[in-house]
Image (cartoon, rainbow, N blue to C red):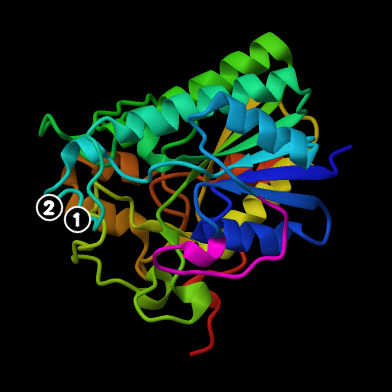
Amino acid sequence: MIRNVLITGGGGSLAEFVVQELRDKYQLTLFDRNHPRQHRDHPWESNLPFVLGDLTSFGHCMRAMTLARADAIVHLGAIPWNTELQPGKASPFRIVLPEDETMRVNVMGTYYLMDAARRLGVKKVAFASSFYVLGLGFRISDKPFQVDYLPIDEEHPLRPEDTYSLSKVLGEEMLRAFSRTYGIQTIALRLQPIDHQTARGLPGGQGERAPLHPEARPDWVGGPIGWTYQYVDVRDAALAFRLALEAEGLEKFEAFYIQTDTVLEEDPRAVVGRTCPDLKEMAANLHGKEGMISGQRAREKLGFVPRHSWRNRTK
């Protein structure tokens, strides 16, 4: 039975909503390099136990898990962009970090965390992966992403190029290896771009900007094949983590695509057929308004039903 949960990246904006989703059921401890009140964009207050430390220190990971008496881990901590492409239009972030920082933190941080977890008897790890594992994000080679079939599901080949995408693929492979070797239950949630703004009632949220004109190329994501017109509301992402902790009967390692909705009012089959003519025949297989990436596995195995689509908002 899971009672004590350690949340890495515990000072981040996703962690705020994961805490809201989990705190009534679990004893939570936050682990991060910065306290929630120091978050750059959305500082927030928390009275939960907080462990100051770095994922890339094995000792810090051991200490955080020991203090939390962790039965399970929600692993949110990561560098959320590709530092080898900065500065530049592909990564218009305010902080410039060493070019190897994404790989160092995301890959070695996950390794140290998992190695500490197996030593301390952690039963389950839910990992914040990304739909970018597919290789849809930044095509450094300038070769278009190869879509083998639609809708894309968890069996579709992964073809990453940038370090962020690659780091998430390697993170999933580490989870798979630790599950195979030590029997830890691991779950990778491949999140679509996270909409934080709508949940906070702030302008600019993807849910608030929907519906999108079908010929528009969203400037915040880089176009229809760089992105699938899908997003996840941060509250739905938090729900997915709770369901992952509660799920029973899963394989030792499983991955799930997690999204709230498309930002299209029009049928995605028609939009994909027009904007990506080479995918027109494949697009005929899309289901209703779900979009290019399927959420069927998450519905069937996690019971994930998103609650915060823009379609549900009061006009």
Q: What stretch is highlighted in magenta?
A: 36-50
Mark 1 lies on a secondary structure that is: loop
CB under 8 Å between discs 2 and 1: yes
Residue at the extreme top of the image, as rendered = 181
- Residue located at (72% from left, 18% from top): 119
> Left or right: 145 with respect to 263?
left
> Label 1: which residue?
92
> Compared to 237, does 65 lie above or below?
above
Can you give x and y, in whole percent of width and height, for residue 153 in the image? 47, 35
Amino acid carrying mark 2 in the image:
Lys
> Left or right: 184 with respect to 289?
right
- Residue located at (25% from left, 66% from top): 214
> Left or right: 107 with respect to 127?
left
> Left or right: 147 with respect to 151?
left
> Label 2: which residue?
89
Residue 183 forms part of the magenta stretch = no
